[in-house]
Amino acid sequence: MKILLLIVVQVLLIEISLHAQNNTKVNLSFENKVQSWLTENNVPAVGIGIIEDAKIKYIKVFGELKKGVPAPDNAIFSVASITKTVTAMLTLKLVEAGQWDLDAPLFQHWVDPDIANNPLHKQLTTRHVLSHKTGFPNWRGKEKLTFKFEPGTEYNYSGEGFVYLARALESKFGKTLQQLSDSLLFKPMGMKDTRYGWNKNVDESRFVYGHDTKGNIYPRSERAESSAGGAAGSLLTTVEDYCKFSINLINGAGLSEILYNDMVSPHSKIKEHHSYGLGWEIISDLPNGEYTLGHGGNNKGYKTKVIILPESKRAIIVFTNGDNGIFVYNNVIKESIDIGENILDHLRGLNNRQLVALPQEVLEKYIGKYLIDSYGKIVTITKSDSVLVISSDGSPTAKLYPEAEGKFFLKDFDVQCEFPNDSTLTLIENGKIDWTAKKIK
């Protein structure tokens, strides 16, 4: 009788397991398209992680670390601004432990010399940093750090803010950002391949090299950023490690209900359905009552994206090692998540921009090279048939479609380029001016 009961139990367990697999929401039909996406966009590799029911369901890295070197599934990617989600979570862990205050002025622990004489620095708080309301530019570039507006009054995405916060954390606790993250995040979650910036512990045989839009390799940075300087964009990690981090978030991140709800509540509106919480982008009003927590990464040679759906306990993580990687990860998102297209629609913002035809001589007057003074970066505008093409080191090559003389837009992205005159180019993203460049050739 006992043997019969054991057999029945085993059969039931097998049936339950098969039923769970057959009812999975993970759609892997994109797999046979991945290599063509990589090839057509000159992106050597893409790492994909899919989470369902707060468990890892799929991890695979396609392509090469660099030419001729196949990428293993535990390849180590630089994930650019996705770093901010880790820095934010570290900070919230300290808040939860009662060791840090979201609303206390940061000047108690750190003051950047550039703004020491500006009284606005005394208003700056951690909440402002995590919601991108510091008043800082994204990066100061060659200029001194300044306030563009009073902290807390407007939204403006800022990597400078995260570096500022990290310097305050290091000053208070007398530890590097890496040491703090090791003790509160990486070791407890088993994220053994995650660190801020390059150091001797990185397994170079698994390191994914960045590539430009033509598929040419960028030299690896030797810069070690285990300190505050890497708080906004230097994280190295694997798809598996970041899946572990995402699962921890889905399961509450060890935060109180009050603090968790504060984190996922909109604090800064970007546009309709799109806002910022504390360290996370939020896409709301999705089908089935879903919302997403997510972030993107955009560094030279690396384009990355993470989208987490807390309500259904799902996530998609996509890391690429090419400047055109954004086109690859958008395809993966559209084809692997049932509401992927809805998410992308909210991210890029639905608009009524209409394509118009401009005379060739009008298009030709915009052709040339433009210099962004603050970054020392060159942007090139060329012409292809009836559209312009924008390119620069570290950015995807994209077509600019005319909607009026001097005004162009990118399809599938909330990005516009405007030429106020024949010698000036302005890029606008999410309704805000990102940079202005002057024609030099």
Image (tube, rainbow, N blue to C red):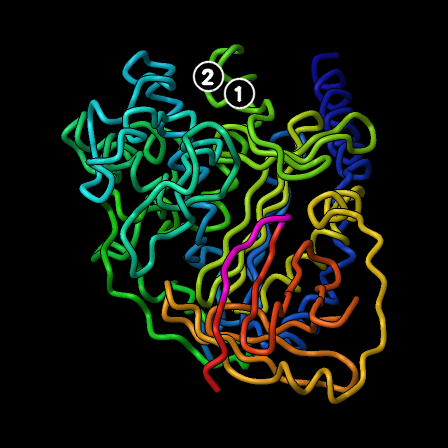
The residue identified by callout 1 is 252
In the image, 31 versus 438, the foreground residue is 438
The residue identified by callout 2 is 255
Q: Is residue 177 magenta?
A: no
Tell me which amino acid carries mark 1.
Gly
Residue drawn at (21%, 34%) of the image: 111
Residue drawn at (31%, 48%) of the image: 230
Q: Is residue 426 above or below residue 169?
A: below
The residue segment tinted magenta is: 430-436
Q: Position of residue 404 (x, y in %)?
A: 78, 68
Q: Image quadrant for the N terminus?
A: top right
Q: Position of residue 134 (x, y in %)?
A: 41, 35
Residue drawn at (48%, 87%) of the image: 441
Q: Tell me where residue 319 sits by quadrant.
A: bottom right
**Mark 2–mark 1 CB contact (< 8 Å):** yes
Tell me which amino acid carries mark 2.
Leu
Farthest residue to the left: give it. Answer: 174
> At numbered mark 1, what does the secondary structure look like: helix, strand or loop?
loop
Q: Main secondary structure of the magenta part?
A: strand
Q: Tell me where residue 425 sits by quadrant.
A: bottom right
In the image, 393 versus 328, the foreground residue is 393
Instruction: Check disc 1: other Cα within 10 Å, few if <14, some if 14-19, many if 20+.
Output: some
